[in-house]
Amino acid sequence: MGINVDKVRQAFNSGNWAEIGVSKVFDEAIQKGELLSTTINKSGSVLEDTTNKINNLTSIMQSKQNSFETLFNVNNAIKFAATVGQIGSIMTSITNLGNIIKNEDLSASEKLAKVLTNIGFLLPMIINTSKNISSLLGITNALTQRRLFLEQKISKEKERQALLDKKAEIAEKAKVL
C-alpha cells in the first residue's frame, strides 16, 4: 500500500495539525523518493554507457592481441626457417672441415689455410645461430607472458562487467520499488 498524497494534502488543508507534521514528513519522503528515482535513472544510463565502453575496450584489446600474435608468429616462422638454414650451413661446413683434413692431395699448409678459412666462416654462423635460438626461446617466453597478461586483463574486465550488470539489475529492481 502506498501513501495517498491527496489524503495527506486534505488533512493539511483542513487544519488538522496532527496530520500536518506527518504531511511534511510525507512530502519530504515523496520529494526524496522522486530525487532517488531520478538519480537511479541517471545512474542506469551512465552504467549502460560505461558498459558499452568496457565492451568496446575489451574488443579492442582482443583484436590487438590477435594482431600481435599473428605478427609475432610470422616473425617467428621466418626466424625459425633462417635458423634451420643456418644449422644446415654449419653442418655442411663441419663436413667440409673433415673432407679438407682427409684430402691427401693437399699439402699441410694448404690444409691449414683451408681449415682456418672454413673456421673463419663457421664461427660467425655458430654465434649467429645460437643468438637466433636464444631469441626464439626468449620471444616465445615473452609472448607467453604477454598472452597471460592480456588474458588476466580481459578476465578482470569481464568480472568488472559482471559487477556492472549486477548493479544495473539492482537499479532496475529499485525502479520497480
Image (cartoon, helix red, strand yellow):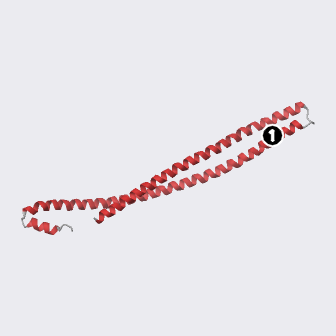
Residue 92's place in the image compared with 163, above or below, is above
Q: Which residue is mark 1?
A: 94
Question: Residue 59's spot in the image, x, y percent?
Answer: 50, 57
Q: Going by the image, does 87 lie left or right of 153?
A: right
Q: Going by the image, does 45 lie left or right of 104?
A: left
Residue sitting at the far right: 105
Residue at 30% in and 64% down:
175
Question: Residue 48's spot in the image, x, y percent?
Answer: 38, 60
Residue at 79% in and 43% down:
91
The quadrant in which residue 125 appears is top right
Q: 72 and 141: which one is in front?
A: 141
Question: Residue 20's spot in the image, x, y percent?
Answer: 10, 62
Residue at 13% in and 61% down:
22
Q: Going by the image, does 75 lie left or right of 85?
A: left
Residue 109's place in the image compared with 11, above or below, is above
Check disc 1 and give the amino acid type: Ile
